[in-house]
Amino acid sequence: LMLLAELEEALFIPLAATPLAQAVGLTPLALAAGVSCLAAQLLLFVAFSYLLPDGPWRRLPGLTAHQCICFPLMIGLACVGVQDWFLSAAVPTSLSGRVLDEHRLGGQLAQLVYGELLLWDIPCGLLVPSLREPLMLAHHFGMAAVAYATLSPLCSYYAVFF
């Protein structure tokens, strides 16, 4: 954990302070999520393409790498979101509280999803031929818009639902 904190302080906080990162809403958490997914994609692509013996992963190494990252990521996000949505005691009691008050976990999930979409998932969808499905690209751009909208405290409570 100490290494992660040092990495965040040395790399992601300064990168998030750049004008480009600020212009597109990349926070240190969003950068860490996106860069981590991108690094895993590249490492797994090389492994599936060149290091592992022949098998189905060698025919579509970009897709296989993407699925190996995406599946546990989506399961983790779903588990955290469902747990918070149904079991959290910190649910705002009024509609205005759910819309206007900041929800810490919702904001963190929005940052994580925004970073992985902007820096890894959308570029993979554009660059990996087997992932270049128009419907999925539209889905990813739409999810990026929803995640960006919930980066502010406004509606961050609902980020755990999505």
Image (cartoon, rainbow, N blue to C red):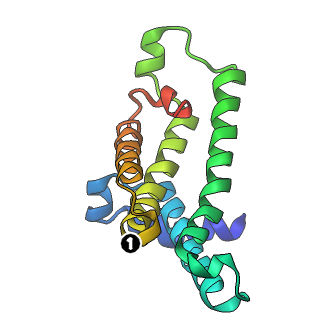
Of residues 4 and 160, the one nearer the viewer is 160
Residue 8: percent from the left, percent from the top? 55, 66
The image quadrant that residue 39 belongs to is bottom right
Quadrant of the frame with the N terminus = bottom right
Q: Quadrant of residue 151?
A: top left
**Residue at left 60%, top 86%?**
49
- Judging from the image, what secondary structure is the residue with disc 1 in? helix
The residue located at (65%, 55%) in the rendering is 71
Q: Is residue 148 left or right of residue 94?
A: left
* Residue highlighted by disc 1: 127
**How many marks on residues?**
1
- Could you say which is closer to the camera, residue 100 or residue 124? 124
- Position of 2 with respect to 22 (left or right) is right
In the image, 100 versus 46, the foreground residue is 46
* Front residue of this view, candidates 46 and 16: 46
Q: Residue at x 65, y 84 (%)?
A: 47
Q: Residue furthest bottom?
A: 50
Left or right: residue 6 versus residue 133 is right
Residue extending farthest to the top is 94
Please name the residue shown 35% across and 37% down the image. Answer: 149
Image coords of residue 17 (percent x, y) = 35, 62
How crowded pointer 1 is (Cα within 10 Å; few <14, some 14-19, many 20+) is rated as: few
Against 107, is 6 above or below?
Answer: below
Examine the rendered structure and indicate whether residue 35 appears above or below residue 156. Answer: below
> Which amino acid is tagged 1?
Leu
Measured as percent of width and height from the top left, residue 26 is found at 38, 56
